[in-house]
Image: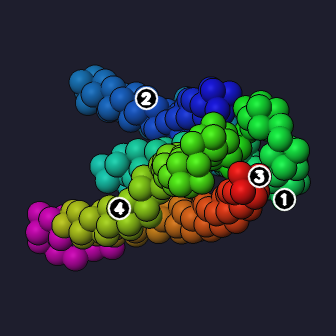
């Protein structure tokens, strides 16, 4: 499991850098734009006549256009986009971490159970314990706990199975509360952005004293962008949460069936 944790930490770092990079660029662009506006206002120079000394701007490349659209989209979403960004980073990191964990925990439960039961029936309990130590996954951990207490009787083995199973289940469920919370919080944050965007739109109308599309456009754009972003985050997170829940249910079913078979084999050898 140490290898899984190292990979999970690496995945968290990569995900954080990947998602936060656009936001950093947006910060830099906004600061540069503000500096340019301040310089222009302080110069007070008469603008040149139309067409004098002007150079047509170079057409943006396809890559620059795509990057600009993402950054503009984020900037137009307003301040609510930052908690949405944090929510997506946390959810994405836990999704990657759980994928690694479940992939490394997956084994052929039927083949492994048959192998351990065969060793137990042959009276090779020590060899069976060593086999469990070399095998990854929750089933191997539960089997190891059961075999280490098998000499104390079936009741002790069953208690060990229950305790070890609870520990393994908690490990499998780790991080699911984050995904469940993210799938709920993201749409709420999106709706909060809708409210703040509409407030901005009406404030613009109040200042101007009249209704013009250009006045309310930025507020309405903020409202729609945050709502769409919140839903776009919530949908995949909810899907992955349900997927992980179903995987855990299968793990639990395999643990129960395999442990019952192992305890029956131990009981037969002690009869």
How far apart marks 4 and 2 lie (CA) works out to 28 Å
Height in image: 130 above or below 50? Answer: above
Asked whether the viewer can see residue 3, the reply is yes
Residue, disc 4: 185
Where residue 218 appears, as percent x and y from the top left, is 34, 62
Q: Which residue is mark 3?
A: 269
Which-is-in-front pick, marks 4 and 3? 3
Q: Secondary structure at mark 4?
A: helix
Q: Main secondary structure of the magenta part?
A: helix
Rendered-image quadrant of the N terminus: top right
Disc 2 on helix, strand or loop? Answer: helix
Say which element carries label 3. Answer: helix
Which mark's residue is nearer the viewer, 1 or 4?
Answer: 1
Q: CA distance from mark 2 to mark 3?
A: 71 Å
Bounds of the magenta span? Answer: 202-215
The relative height of residue 87 versus residue 38 in the rendered view (above or below) is below
Name the residue tied to disc 1: 110
Point 63% across, 40% down: residue: 151
Label 4 – label 3 distance at C-alpha = 54 Å
For discs 2 and 3, the disc positioned in front in the rendered view: 3
User: Which coloring applies here?
Assistant: rainbow
Choose between 36 and 63: the one closer to the eye.
Answer: 63
- Say few, some or many: other residues with alpha carbon within 10 Å of mark 1 (under 14 / 14 to 19 / 20 or more): few
Residue 114, horizontal then vertical, whole percent? 86, 54
Tell me whether circle 1 and circle 2 mark residues in contact (CB < 8 Å).
no
Query: Which residue is label 2 attached to?
Result: 28
């Amino acid at each position: 499991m140490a290898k899984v944790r190292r990979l999970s930490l690496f995945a968290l770092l990569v995900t954080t850098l990947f998602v936060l990079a656009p936001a950093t660029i947006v910060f830099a662009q906004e600061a540069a734009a503000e500096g340019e506006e301040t310089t222009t206002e302080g110069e007070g120079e008469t603008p040149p006549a139309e067409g004098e000394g002007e150079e047509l701007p170079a057409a943006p490349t396809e890559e620059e256009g795509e990057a600009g659209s993402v950054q503009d989209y984020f900037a137009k979403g307003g301040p609510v986009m930052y908690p949405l960004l944090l929510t997506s980073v946390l959810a994405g990191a836990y999704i990657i971490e759980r994928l690694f964990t479940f992939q490394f925990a997956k084994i052929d439960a039927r083949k492994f159970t048959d192998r351990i039961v065969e060793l137990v029936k042959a009276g090779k309990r020590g060899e069976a314990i060593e086999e469990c130590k070399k095998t990854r996954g929750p089933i191997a951990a539960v089997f190891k706990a059961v075999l280490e207490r098998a000499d104390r009787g079936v009741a002790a083995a069953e208690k060990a199975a229950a305790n070890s199973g609870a520990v393994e289940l908690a490990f499998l469920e780790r991080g699911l509360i984050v995904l469940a919370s993210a799938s709920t919080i993201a749409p709420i944050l999106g709706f909060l952005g809708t409210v703040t965007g509409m407030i901005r739109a009406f404030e613009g109308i109040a200042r101007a004293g009249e209704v013009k599309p250009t006045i309310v456009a930025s507020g309405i754009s903020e409202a729609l962008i945050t709502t769409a972003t919140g839903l776009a985050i919530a949908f995949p997170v909810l899907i992955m949460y349900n997927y992980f829940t179903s995987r855990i249910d299968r793990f639990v079913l395999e643990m129960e069936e395999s442990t019952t078979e192992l305890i029956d084999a131990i009981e037969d050898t002690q009869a």
